[in-house]
Amino acid sequence: MNNQHAGESLATSMSELCSRFSFREILVATIIARRKRRRMVNSVDFFPAWLRRDLALLHE
């Protein structure tokens, strides 16, 4: 997929998204998704217990 095709695909997807949902709904969903992603990235729960122990990380 080249950049021009990717840009056209993104523009089409955004147009469809905007026609289905209001700007406010899209904004709220984006904020919620970013918060969830930040929590997932900062979490160490996905590490196995032995690795957390070896790295001296407390279990949250």
Image: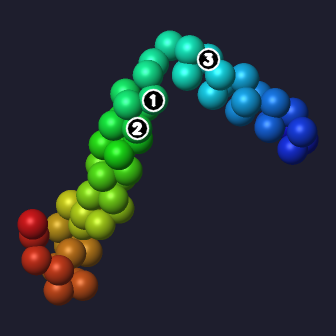
Residue 26, placed above or below residue 50:
above
Residue that numbered label 3 is attached to: 16
Residue 10 on image: x %, y % = 71, 33
On screen, residue 9 versus residue 20, left or right, reads right
Q: Which of the numbered marks, if any, corresponds to residue 27?
A: 2
Q: Earlier in the sequence, mark 3 or mark 2?
A: 3
Q: Which mark is residue 23?
A: 1
Circle 1 residues within 10 Å: few <14, some 14–19, many ≥20: few
Residue 11 occupies quadrant: top right
Which of the two residues, 42 or 9, is positioned nearer the viewer here?
A: 9
Judge by depth and name the residue closer to the eye, 29 or 3: 29
Q: What is the spatial separation of the Cα atoms under label 1 and label 3, in whole angstroms?
A: 12 Å
Provide the secondary structure element on which disc 1 rests: helix
The answer to whether any part of residue 20 appears in the image is yes
Q: For the residue labelled by badge 2, is the local secondary structure a helix, a strand or a loop?
A: helix
Do tag 3 and tag 2 residues touch (Cβ < 8 Å)? no
Of all residues, the one furthest to the top in this rendering is 20
> Residue flagged by tag 2: what amino acid is it?
Leu
Q: Position of residue 4 (x, y in %)?
A: 89, 39
Residue 43 versus residue 29 in the image, above or below:
below
Residue at horizontal 33%, vertical 37%?
A: 28
Q: Are marks 1 and 2 in contact (CB under 8 Å)?
A: yes
Q: Quadrant of the C terminus?
A: bottom left
